[in-house]
Image: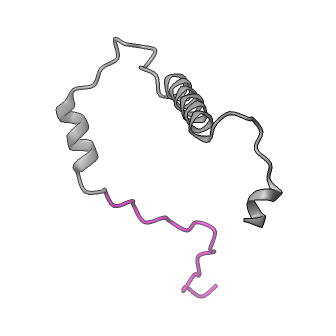
Amino acid sequence: MSLLRKFPRLTKLPLGVEITILLVVKVALITVLAKTFFAHPEAKHMRMPTASVEQRMLAPAAMAPAPTNTATPQVSTSPE
């Protein structure tokens, strides 16, 4: 109980009302953030065919070509 006494409550409202207010504020904040950052695309005319998106997303990853190392000097085997 001593831990609860260290942090006094900010309001004198009943605990249920205080929790309800905090949950309403939290849901409102999450809704605003979702509408802001996860809104519909600006260019609504730009639609991709579902089949090509599925093929691209579900296809196995293409292997990247092996990098060529051009920084190493070539050793000549012919006598000079």
- Say whether residue 18 is left or right of residue 53: right
Note whether 57 is above or below 46 in the view shown: below
Q: Name the residue rendered at 28%, 45% in the picture.
A: 57
Is 5 magenta? The answer is: no
Note whether 40 is above or below 80 in the view shown: above
Residue 64: give x, y in percent of width and height: 39, 59
Please state which of residues 78 and 38 is positioned toward the viewer in this rendering.
Answer: 38
Q: Name the residue rendered at 79%, 57% in the picture.
A: 5
Please state which of residues 30 and 26 is positioned toward the viewer in this rendering.
Answer: 26
Give the prevailing secondary structure in the magenta stretch: loop
Quadrant of the rendered image containing residue 16: top right
Task: Give the position of the C terminus as an image quadrant.
Answer: bottom right
Residue 34: give x, y in percent of width and height: 50, 28
Please state which of residues 71 and 38 is positioned toward the viewer in this rendering.
Answer: 38
- Say whether residue 14 is left or right of residue 30: right
Is 74 magenta? The answer is: yes
Q: Residue furthest left?
A: 51
The magenta segment:
62-80
Q: Name the residue rendered at 33%, 61% in the picture.
A: 63
